[in-house]
Image (spheres, grey):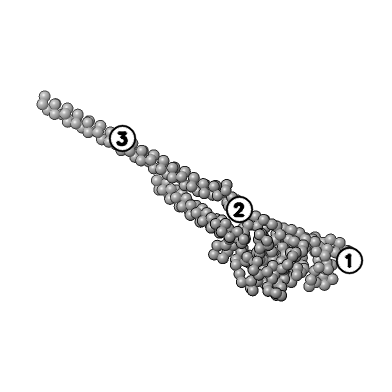
Amino acid sequence: MKKGSGFLHKLASAIGILLIVLFGLLLLFNITIIVKGLINSSVPPSVFGVTPLVVKSGSMSSDVQHSVYANELVDITPEAVKALKPGDKVYTMAGDYRIENVIVSVNGADSDEPFFLVERPAADHIEVGDLILVKSADTNTIKVGDVISFMENSSVVTHRVIGINEANGRSFITKGDANNSADTGDPVPADKVVGVFSSRIPALGDFIYFLQQPLGMAIFIGVPVLTFLIYDIIRRSRASKRKTEKEESLEEELARLRAMARELEEKKAAEAKKDND
Protein backbone atom coordinates (compact mmCIF):
# COMPACT_ATOMS: atom_id res chain seq x y z
CA MET A 1 0.00 0.00 0.00
CA LYS A 2 2.83 2.39 0.97
CA LYS A 3 4.72 1.55 -2.25
CA GLY A 4 1.67 2.44 -4.39
CA SER A 5 1.08 5.63 -2.42
CA GLY A 6 4.72 6.64 -2.89
CA PHE A 7 4.51 6.09 -6.64
CA LEU A 8 1.35 8.22 -6.91
CA HIS A 9 3.02 10.96 -4.88
CA LYS A 10 6.05 10.99 -7.20
CA LEU A 11 3.81 10.95 -10.27
CA ALA A 12 1.74 13.87 -8.99
CA SER A 13 4.93 15.81 -8.20
CA ALA A 14 6.34 15.15 -11.69
CA ILE A 15 3.09 16.25 -13.36
CA GLY A 16 2.98 19.37 -11.19
CA ILE A 17 6.55 20.33 -12.08
CA LEU A 18 5.89 19.66 -15.78
CA LEU A 19 2.79 21.87 -15.77
CA ILE A 20 4.62 24.67 -13.98
CA VAL A 21 7.49 24.54 -16.49
CA LEU A 22 5.04 24.44 -19.43
CA PHE A 23 2.97 27.34 -18.12
CA GLY A 24 6.16 29.24 -17.36
CA LEU A 25 7.51 28.84 -20.91
CA LEU A 26 4.17 29.84 -22.46
CA LEU A 27 3.94 32.82 -20.12
CA LEU A 28 7.48 33.92 -21.02
CA PHE A 29 6.70 33.54 -24.73
CA ASN A 30 3.47 35.50 -24.38
CA ILE A 31 5.11 38.31 -22.40
CA THR A 32 7.94 38.55 -24.96
CA ILE A 33 5.41 38.91 -27.78
CA ILE A 34 3.43 41.56 -25.87
CA VAL A 35 6.53 43.59 -24.92
CA LYS A 36 7.93 43.50 -28.46
CA GLY A 37 4.55 44.54 -29.82
CA LEU A 38 4.48 47.55 -27.45
CA ILE A 39 8.03 48.58 -28.36
CA ASN A 40 7.38 48.47 -32.11
CA SER A 41 3.69 48.38 -32.97
CA SER A 42 4.26 48.92 -36.71
CA VAL A 43 5.30 45.30 -37.35
CA PRO A 44 4.19 42.02 -35.73
CA PRO A 45 6.67 40.78 -33.08
CA SER A 46 8.84 37.75 -33.77
CA VAL A 47 10.87 35.32 -31.66
CA PHE A 48 14.05 33.82 -33.18
CA GLY A 49 12.91 34.86 -36.66
CA VAL A 50 9.46 33.27 -36.29
CA THR A 51 6.36 35.44 -36.15
CA PRO A 52 3.24 33.90 -34.56
CA LEU A 53 -0.01 35.22 -35.98
CA VAL A 54 -3.63 34.64 -34.99
CA VAL A 55 -5.87 34.08 -38.01
CA LYS A 56 -9.03 36.19 -38.00
CA SER A 57 -10.06 35.85 -41.67
CA GLY A 58 -11.24 32.87 -43.69
CA SER A 59 -9.62 34.05 -46.94
CA MET A 60 -7.25 31.04 -46.95
CA SER A 61 -9.83 28.46 -45.84
CA SER A 62 -10.30 25.19 -47.73
CA ASP A 63 -13.94 24.88 -46.63
CA VAL A 64 -15.25 27.33 -49.25
CA GLN A 65 -16.76 25.89 -52.44
CA HIS A 66 -16.34 27.64 -55.80
CA SER A 67 -18.14 27.66 -59.12
CA VAL A 68 -15.88 26.94 -62.10
CA TYR A 69 -16.95 27.11 -65.76
CA ALA A 70 -15.68 24.79 -68.45
CA ASN A 71 -13.81 27.57 -70.23
CA GLU A 72 -11.78 28.21 -67.05
CA LEU A 73 -10.33 24.69 -67.01
CA VAL A 74 -6.80 24.15 -68.29
CA ASP A 75 -4.96 21.11 -69.68
CA ILE A 76 -8.18 19.31 -70.62
CA THR A 77 -9.95 18.53 -73.89
CA PRO A 78 -13.65 19.32 -74.61
CA GLU A 79 -14.36 15.59 -74.73
CA ALA A 80 -12.80 15.09 -71.29
CA VAL A 81 -14.84 18.00 -69.91
CA LYS A 82 -18.08 16.22 -70.87
CA ALA A 83 -16.93 13.09 -69.00
CA LEU A 84 -16.15 14.87 -65.73
CA LYS A 85 -17.91 13.63 -62.61
CA PRO A 86 -17.84 14.34 -58.85
CA GLY A 87 -14.49 13.41 -57.30
CA ASP A 88 -12.46 14.17 -60.44
CA LYS A 89 -9.58 16.65 -60.25
CA VAL A 90 -9.46 19.61 -62.61
CA TYR A 91 -7.13 22.58 -62.84
CA THR A 92 -7.63 26.32 -63.16
CA MET A 93 -5.25 29.26 -63.14
CA ALA A 94 -5.00 32.26 -60.81
CA GLY A 95 -2.38 34.47 -62.35
CA ASP A 96 0.65 32.21 -62.79
CA TYR A 97 -0.51 29.77 -60.10
CA ARG A 98 -2.07 26.46 -61.13
CA ILE A 99 -4.94 25.52 -58.78
CA GLU A 100 -6.03 21.95 -58.10
CA ASN A 101 -9.83 21.60 -57.79
CA VAL A 102 -11.92 18.59 -56.76
CA ILE A 103 -15.36 18.46 -58.35
CA VAL A 104 -18.28 18.31 -55.93
CA SER A 105 -21.10 18.46 -58.49
CA VAL A 106 -21.61 18.87 -62.25
CA ASN A 107 -24.19 21.40 -63.38
CA GLY A 108 -25.63 21.87 -66.86
CA ALA A 109 -23.80 18.87 -68.25
CA ASP A 110 -25.99 18.90 -71.40
CA SER A 111 -25.56 22.64 -72.04
CA ASP A 112 -22.89 24.38 -74.07
CA GLU A 113 -21.39 25.92 -70.93
CA PRO A 114 -21.41 23.40 -68.05
CA PHE A 115 -20.08 24.58 -64.72
CA PHE A 116 -18.82 22.75 -61.70
CA LEU A 117 -19.00 23.20 -57.97
CA VAL A 118 -15.48 22.51 -56.67
CA GLU A 119 -13.43 22.40 -53.49
CA ARG A 120 -9.76 23.35 -53.21
CA PRO A 121 -8.24 21.20 -50.44
CA ALA A 122 -4.80 22.85 -50.31
CA ALA A 123 -2.33 21.18 -47.97
CA ASP A 124 -1.28 24.60 -46.64
CA HIS A 125 -4.81 25.89 -46.03
CA ILE A 126 -5.40 28.17 -43.04
CA GLU A 127 -8.59 28.37 -41.00
CA VAL A 128 -10.08 31.03 -38.74
CA GLY A 129 -8.79 30.68 -35.17
CA ASP A 130 -5.53 28.98 -36.17
CA LEU A 131 -2.16 30.06 -34.86
CA ILE A 132 0.23 30.25 -37.80
CA LEU A 133 4.02 30.49 -37.70
CA VAL A 134 5.65 32.70 -40.31
CA LYS A 135 9.41 32.52 -40.90
CA SER A 136 11.43 35.48 -42.07
CA ALA A 137 12.87 34.83 -45.53
CA ASP A 138 14.90 36.37 -48.31
CA THR A 139 12.25 37.81 -50.64
CA ASN A 140 14.39 36.82 -53.62
CA THR A 141 13.66 33.17 -52.81
CA ILE A 142 9.86 33.60 -52.72
CA LYS A 143 8.16 31.91 -55.66
CA VAL A 144 4.68 31.56 -57.15
CA GLY A 145 2.58 29.27 -54.94
CA ASP A 146 4.19 30.32 -51.65
CA VAL A 147 1.95 31.68 -48.90
CA ILE A 148 3.30 34.93 -47.49
CA SER A 149 2.33 37.33 -44.73
CA PHE A 150 2.64 41.02 -45.49
CA MET A 151 1.73 44.39 -44.04
CA GLU A 152 -1.32 46.11 -45.47
CA ASN A 153 -1.59 49.46 -43.73
CA SER A 154 -1.55 48.45 -40.03
CA SER A 155 -2.85 44.91 -40.58
CA VAL A 156 -1.11 41.66 -41.50
CA VAL A 157 -2.54 39.72 -44.45
CA THR A 158 -1.60 36.12 -45.28
CA HIS A 159 -2.29 35.19 -48.92
CA ARG A 160 -0.81 33.09 -51.70
CA VAL A 161 1.59 34.46 -54.31
CA ILE A 162 0.05 34.06 -57.78
CA GLY A 163 2.46 36.30 -59.66
CA ILE A 164 5.79 38.11 -59.29
CA ASN A 165 6.53 41.53 -60.74
CA GLU A 166 10.22 42.33 -61.27
CA ALA A 167 9.70 45.87 -62.62
CA ASN A 168 10.89 48.66 -60.30
CA GLY A 169 11.96 46.20 -57.62
CA ARG A 170 10.49 42.84 -56.72
CA SER A 171 6.81 42.78 -55.75
CA PHE A 172 4.15 40.09 -55.39
CA ILE A 173 0.63 39.64 -56.73
CA THR A 174 -1.41 37.81 -54.12
CA LYS A 175 -4.78 36.14 -53.66
CA GLY A 176 -6.65 34.40 -50.85
CA ASP A 177 -7.47 30.79 -51.76
CA ALA A 178 -11.08 31.30 -50.70
CA ASN A 179 -11.44 34.56 -52.63
CA ASN A 180 -12.75 34.69 -56.19
CA SER A 181 -10.22 37.24 -57.44
CA ALA A 182 -6.71 38.53 -56.82
CA ASP A 183 -6.07 41.18 -54.21
CA THR A 184 -6.87 44.66 -55.44
CA GLY A 185 -4.40 47.49 -55.33
CA ASP A 186 -0.69 47.52 -56.08
CA PRO A 187 1.43 44.36 -55.82
CA VAL A 188 3.05 43.78 -52.41
CA PRO A 189 6.56 45.32 -52.32
CA ALA A 190 9.37 43.23 -50.85
CA ASP A 191 9.83 45.54 -47.87
CA LYS A 192 6.24 44.88 -46.76
CA VAL A 193 6.73 41.11 -46.55
CA VAL A 194 6.78 39.78 -42.97
CA GLY A 195 7.73 36.24 -43.96
CA VAL A 196 6.71 32.94 -45.51
CA PHE A 197 4.04 30.71 -43.97
CA SER A 198 5.67 27.73 -42.25
CA SER A 199 3.03 25.83 -40.28
CA ARG A 200 -0.22 26.16 -38.37
CA ILE A 201 -1.61 24.93 -35.08
CA PRO A 202 -5.38 24.49 -35.47
CA ALA A 203 -7.62 26.49 -33.10
CA LEU A 204 -4.73 27.59 -30.87
CA GLY A 205 -4.88 31.15 -32.15
CA ASP A 206 -8.10 32.00 -30.32
CA PHE A 207 -6.60 30.65 -27.09
CA ILE A 208 -3.40 32.68 -27.53
CA TYR A 209 -5.44 35.80 -28.30
CA PHE A 210 -7.45 35.26 -25.12
CA LEU A 211 -4.25 34.91 -23.08
CA GLN A 212 -3.13 38.34 -24.27
CA GLN A 213 -6.22 39.94 -22.73
CA PRO A 214 -6.22 41.04 -19.05
CA LEU A 215 -8.65 38.29 -18.03
CA GLY A 216 -6.65 35.67 -19.89
CA MET A 217 -3.38 36.82 -18.32
CA ALA A 218 -4.98 36.74 -14.86
CA ILE A 219 -6.26 33.20 -15.40
CA PHE A 220 -3.04 32.12 -17.08
CA ILE A 221 -0.96 33.27 -14.11
CA GLY A 222 -3.53 32.53 -11.43
CA VAL A 223 -4.39 28.94 -12.38
CA PRO A 224 -0.88 27.48 -12.11
CA VAL A 225 -0.15 29.45 -8.93
CA LEU A 226 -3.45 28.39 -7.36
CA THR A 227 -2.87 24.80 -8.48
CA PHE A 228 0.57 24.79 -6.88
CA LEU A 229 -0.77 26.31 -3.64
CA ILE A 230 -3.60 23.76 -3.42
CA TYR A 231 -1.16 20.94 -4.12
CA ASP A 232 1.24 22.27 -1.46
CA ILE A 233 -1.57 22.59 1.10
CA ILE A 234 -2.75 19.03 0.41
CA ARG A 235 0.83 17.74 0.56
CA ARG A 236 1.49 19.49 3.88
CA SER A 237 -1.86 18.32 5.29
CA ARG A 238 -1.12 14.72 4.38
CA ALA A 239 2.40 14.98 5.82
CA SER A 240 1.02 16.47 9.03
CA LYS A 241 -1.60 13.74 9.25
CA ARG A 242 1.02 11.02 8.76
CA LYS A 243 3.19 12.68 11.44
CA THR A 244 0.25 12.84 13.87
CA GLU A 245 -0.65 9.20 13.21
CA LYS A 246 2.98 8.20 13.78
CA GLU A 247 3.14 10.17 17.05
CA GLU A 248 -0.12 8.63 18.23
CA SER A 249 1.21 5.19 17.38
CA LEU A 250 4.41 5.89 19.35
CA GLU A 251 2.38 7.15 22.31
CA GLU A 252 0.27 3.98 22.28
CA GLU A 253 3.43 1.85 22.13
CA LEU A 254 4.99 3.77 25.02
CA ALA A 255 1.80 3.40 27.08
CA ARG A 256 1.81 -0.34 26.38
CA LEU A 257 5.46 -0.62 27.45
CA ARG A 258 4.81 1.40 30.62
CA ALA A 259 1.89 -0.88 31.47
CA MET A 260 4.05 -3.95 30.94
CA ALA A 261 6.77 -2.43 33.15
CA ARG A 262 4.26 -1.73 35.92
CA GLU A 263 2.88 -5.26 35.69
CA LEU A 264 6.41 -6.65 35.90
CA GLU A 265 7.27 -4.50 38.93
CA GLU A 266 4.02 -5.46 40.66
CA LYS A 267 4.73 -9.13 39.96
CA LYS A 268 8.24 -8.85 41.37
CA ALA A 269 6.95 -7.04 44.43
CA ALA A 270 4.31 -9.72 44.99
CA GLU A 271 6.90 -12.50 44.68
CA ALA A 272 9.26 -10.71 47.10
CA LYS A 273 6.49 -10.28 49.66
CA LYS A 274 5.60 -13.94 49.33
CA ASP A 275 9.20 -14.97 49.95
CA ASN A 276 9.41 -12.78 53.07
CA ASP A 277 6.27 -14.32 54.46
Element on which disc 3 rests: helix
Residue designated by label 2: 209
Alpha carbon of mark 3 to alpha carbon of mark 1: how far?
A: 101 Å
Q: Which residue is mark 1?
A: 112
Q: Amino acid at mark 2?
A: Tyr
Q: Residue furthest right?
A: 111
Q: Are marks 3 and 2 in contact (CB under 8 Å)?
A: no
Disc 3 crowd rating (10 Å Cα; few below 14, some 14-19, many 20+) is: few
Question: Alpha-carbon neighbours of circle 1 within 10 Å: few (<14), some, or many (≥20)?
Answer: few
Q: Is residue 10 above or below residue 70?
A: above
Residue at (64, 71) in percent of width and height: 139
Q: Quadrant of the C terminus?
A: top left
- Of badges 3 and 1, the one in the foreground is 1
The 10 Å Cα crowd at callout 2, few under 14, some 14 to 19, many 20 or more, is: some
CB-based contact (under 8 Å), mark 3 and mark 1: no
Q: Work out whether residue 222 can be spotted.
A: yes
Q: Earlier in the sequence, mark 2 or mark 1?
A: 1
Identify the element where label 2 is drawn: helix
Residue farthest to the left?
A: 276
Please tell me which residue is depicted at 80% across the width and 69% down the height of the picture: 73
The disc, 3 or 2, on the residue closer to the chain's N-terminal end is 2
Q: Residue at x 59, y 62 (%)?
A: 51
Along the line of sight, the residue nearer the viewer: 88 or 213: 213
Q: Work out how far the residue at label 3 is from the one at label 2, CA to CA, in angstroms.
A: 60 Å
Residue extending farthest to the top is 277
Query: For mark 3, what is the residue?
Result: 252
Percent from the top left, x then y, of residue 131? 62, 58
Q: Nearer the viewer, residue 101 or 128?
A: 128
Q: Secondary structure at mark 1?
A: loop
Q: Are marks 2 and 1 in contact (CB under 8 Å)?
A: no
Kind of residue at badge 3: Glu
Whole-percent x, y for residue 227 in the image? 49, 46
